[in-house]
Image (spheres, rainbow, N blue to C red):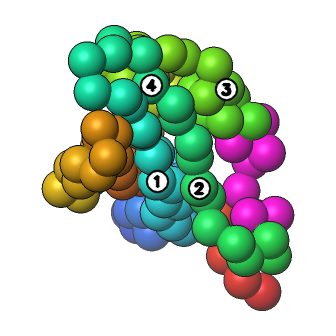
Amino acid sequence: MKKSIILIALLLPLAVMAQTPGFYVKSKDQFFTLFATSYMGSTKCSIKVDFGSDRQLLKQFDNKIIDETSKVKEYDSLADALNYVSALGWEFVFAYPTKFEKNYFFSQYLFKRKVLSEPAK
């Protein structure tokens, strides 16, 4: 009886650790910048996104979420665009100060999200 209790006590922690995704999978942060340009007095704006220029890093991430996030360019309202990326799971990090130049407002917003990735072997 004592041997079975000791065996269970030794194997139970291994079974619990096997269920923890963080034990095998690491999470990384993925960032993107949303650029918004609007004309003074207009409610519409032009929206662009930037995921960075390193294509090797982008290959590590899910292309589906990048494609879905890039659809934000279809919105004419900045509030709609920010709500859309938030609904996709992106977390607001920082808003760069708005610049005003020749009747145009330029805004930048930085977003991030956690991405699960396999550890390097």
Residue type beneath disc 1:
Thr
Q: Which residue is mark 4?
A: 45
Residue type beneath disc 4:
Cys
Q: Which residue occupies 33% across, 40% down?
A: 104
* Chain part drawn in magenta: 58-66
Q: Residue 5, percent across and down?
A: 40, 58
Q: Secondary structure at mark 4?
A: strand
Determine crowd level at label 1: few under 14, some 14-19, many 20+ residues with C-alpha closer than 10 A. some
Determine crowd level at label 4: few under 14, some 14-19, many 20+ residues with C-alpha closer than 10 A. many
Q: Which residue occupies 33% across, 15% down?
A: 42
Looking at the image, residue 70 lies above or below residue 59: above
Is the N terminus in the top left, top right, bottom left or bottom right quadrant? bottom left
Residue type beneath disc 3:
Lys
Q: Which residue is mark 3?
A: 71
Left or right of residue 27: residue 106: left
Sooner in the amino-acid sequence: mark 3 or mark 1: 1
Q: Which residue is mark 2?
A: 50
Q: Residue 63, percent across and down?
A: 79, 45
Label 1 – label 2 distance at C-alpha: 5 Å
* Magenta span includes 61: yes
Q: Residue 59, percent across and down?
A: 81, 64
Left or right of residue 42: residue 89: right
| Mark in the foreground, 1 or 4 | 4
